[in-house]
Amino acid sequence: MKPLLQYLQGTPRTILTGAAILIAIIAFIDWRIPLPYFGFLYLFPMLLVGTVLLPWQIGLMAVFCTVLSDLFDPLPFRPMIISLFQDALLFMALAGMGMFSHAVTINLRMEQKNRQRIEQEVAARQEAEEQLEFLIQTSPVAIVVMNGMGEILVGNSTAHRLFRVGAGELVGRNISSYVPALSHVPSVEDTSQIFRTEMQCRGQREDGDIFLANVFFSTYRTAMGPRLAALVVDTSEDLRNRAEYGLEQLMAGSRILVGAVSHEVRNVCSAIAVIYQNLAQNETLGKNQDFEALGSLIKALRKIASLDLRQSTGGFEARRVDLTGILDEARIVLEPYCAESDITVNWQIPGNLPYVWADRQGLLQVLLNLTKNSRRALEGRSLKRIDVLVTVEHGIVAIRVADTGPGIASTEKLFQPLQKGAEATGLGLFLSRAFMRSFGGDLRYDPEAPGCCFVIELAIAESTDVEHR
């Protein structure tokens, strides 16, 4: 079949031209040499034309070659039945050769296409495997692949650094030595459930150092058995940052509370000092040692109470911030929180909000505290909705947080700390207003709005203002 394959490389015009020349040569030989039955030579051109012609065209070419063979037959005078029988045999032989060539050509072309497709698929697979291997080895995330027994089959360079294992030494070890929780994930052979999830658990390095790990893993089945692929991230630094931030918030709240108490104590001390000065005019009391000691105690108490509220809020500092960005972060935090209690949050935020003076974390804490209060108030209500409306007017940006709860019956001591009958600590609204005032804002209650409505007021920060107040 090699000659046939070579002809297949040519164009149809070239093949048909060669077949025509070959037919002409055979017809000339049949005409010039007076020997019978040169018609079998037409099998060769039929072999050629079968590679490019359609079946009905092959049949016409077989008829044409049969006519040529009969035309140059040196023994034209034969019985009609014999002549027809010979012509029929020749036609079938020529047509059969052409159809055979046609079928072989189709199969060869299909084989070529299949071979090319297989070669392309193999090349694409090799390229994909190389890219995947490069991605795994250069990934900043630790990637490990294990079998059903927990034995590590693949571990990238980041995994070796995370577990503090020498290069290439991780393969063959059991994952239970580094992430024990992964060794308890059921294999696809033990359960029909396929896991594609994440978890936070304890990780351990080769030297015994423990870290907090976020693990994204999935189980799957291969021809070689069950597999477990996992991405491991060390989140110890995030845990420390959250703990430090929580401590800073606690300290900031404590300083604000101490500052507020000091403010009230200072007022009481001022009143006591006035009474003390009036009593000091009495000569009898002025010479009394106990009375003088009382004066010293009053001075000491005033000194202790001299801490100012604004000076005690070192945890927050007013900055020129993008209110739209803060509200976007609030939506990310608050909507899933409210969805757990089937509460709908309706946000009405206009576009192009101005920059305001605020502290990003402090404002988020206030919004979260108001949402928690609304969540408690909406328990057992048929209509559970929180509306957040932002308006801009007279140099102030107002954020109204209203819910469909029962409202507040008495507002006289609403923002006082440690109230009797408070559902939580009794400090939420007190600290929230203190947070707002610490960076120049305010928090007030709107008694005329339906349900329960609190208004956060923030000063607009012009573009020409300095960064810090």
Image (tube, grey):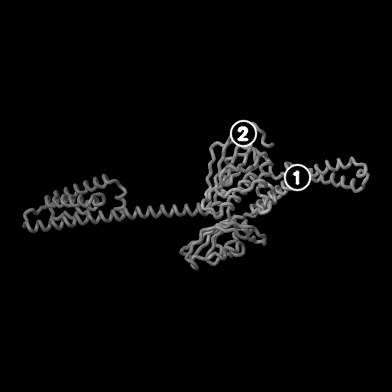
Task: Please indicate, yes or no, whether residue 465 appears anywhere in the rendered image.
Answer: yes
- What residue did someone put label 2 on? 395
- What residue did someone put label 1 on? 264
Q: Judging from the image, what secondary structure is the residue with disc 2 in?
A: loop
Task: Please indicate, yes or no, whether residue 134 appears anywhere in the rendered image.
Answer: no
- The amino acid sitting under disc 2 is Gly
Q: Is residue 253 left or right of residue 448?
A: right
- Residue 437 at x, y percent in the picture: 68, 41
Between residues 284 and 161, which one lies in front from this camera angle?
Answer: 284
- Residue 57 at x, y percent in the picture: 20, 49
Asked if the residue at tag 1 contacts the one at tag 2, i.e. Cβ–Cβ closer than 8 Å, the answer is: no
**Label for residue 321?**
none
**Residue 436 sits in quarter:** top right
Q: Residue at x 61, y 62 (%)?
A: 178
- The amino acid sitting under disc 1 is Glu
- Residue 210 at x, y percent in the picture: 66, 60
Question: Compared to 236, does 313 lie above or below?
Answer: above
The quarter in which the N terminus is drawn is bottom left
Between residues 201 and 260, which one lies in front from this camera angle?
Answer: 260
Q: Is residue 296 left or right of residue 136?
A: right
- Graded by Cα atoms within 10 Å as few (under 14), some (14 to 19) or many (20 or more), the crowding at tag 2 reads few
Between residues 262 and 310, which one lies in front from this camera angle?
Answer: 262
Q: Residue at x 30, y 56 (%)?
A: 107
Q: CA distance from mark 2 to mark 1?
A: 31 Å
The quarter in which the C terminus is drawn is top right
Q: Residue at x 34, y 53 (%)?
A: 112
**Residue 269 sits in quarter:** top right
Q: Residue furthest bottom?
A: 190
